[in-house]
Amino acid sequence: MDTNPIPPWREGWQPAPPREKPTPGPPGNPKWVKGMKSPNPAGRPPGSNAQTKLVQRMLENADGIVDMLLAKAMEGCTNSASLILSRIMPSIKAQAQLVAFDFDHTAPVSAQVEQVISAIADGTVPADIGRQIIDAIGTLSAIRANEELEARITALEEKQG
């Protein structure tokens, strides 16, 4: 027994064959052939595209636009005020705060990290700043290790000849 019987109105139905896409012709003007004199020897005049025309119109009306924005901002429009202030004053970027704590830069790396962790535990250094300091210590340690390896390799190469 068939689990999906075909309804009588669908018997003998076949989908339409896919349509063939027309082949595109050559790009550009089909009447122009290579070596033929250009139909537009002067080329497109400068400033003839839509974007250039729009910019020109905006520049011609810039004073009016600024006056309108200032007037709306003075009336209390926060969007206008925000736009004006964003162009006049740079946005304030977050800066890490300065911290002072006992730190021996001549100590081994593990001791330096312990000093930072101790300062975090004491509350002298905020945790996020302490993390940045520990990352910097790790980066400096990796750089020093690379320099030491390079010096050792150079010494071995000179020793071998």
Image (cartoon, rainbow, N blue to C red):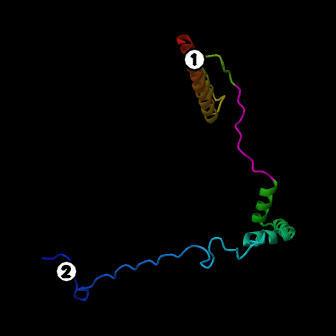
Residue 159, image x and y in percent? 55, 10
Which residue position holds label 1? 154
Task: Tell me the quarter of the image containing the C terminus.
Answer: top right
Query: Disc 2 on helix, strand or loop?
Result: loop
Q: Earlier in the sequence, mark 1 or mark 2?
A: 2
- Residue nearer the viewer, 95 or 28: 28
What is the residue that sits farthest to the bottom in this orientation? 9
Apparent side of residue 125 relative to residue 78 in the rendered image (left or right): left
What is the residue that sits farthest to the top in this orientation? 159
Query: Disc 1 on helix, strand or loop?
Result: helix
* Callout count: 2
- Residue nearer the viewer, 157 or 99: 157
Q: Can you say whether 12 is above or below 132 in the image?
A: below
Where residue 66 sits, quadrant-wise, is: bottom right
Q: Can you say whether 105 is above or below 57 in the image?
A: above
- Residue nearer the viewer, 71 or 19: 19
Residue 11, image x and y in percent? 23, 86
The label shown at residue 129 is none
- Residue nearer the viewer, 16 or 115: 16
Label 2 amino acid?
Pro
Label 1 amino acid?
Thr
Task: Tell me the quarter of the image containing the N terminus.
Answer: bottom left
Asked whether residue 113 appears in the rendered view, the answer is no
Asked whether residue 142 appears in the rendered view, the answer is yes
Specify whether residue 70 is painted magenta: no
Q: Residues within 10 Å of mark 1 (few under 14, many from 20)?
A: few
Where residue 140 sits, quadrant-wise, is: top right
Tell me what residue is drawn at x 20 percent, y 77 percent. 4
Magenta highlight range: 89-100
The label shown at residue 5 is 2
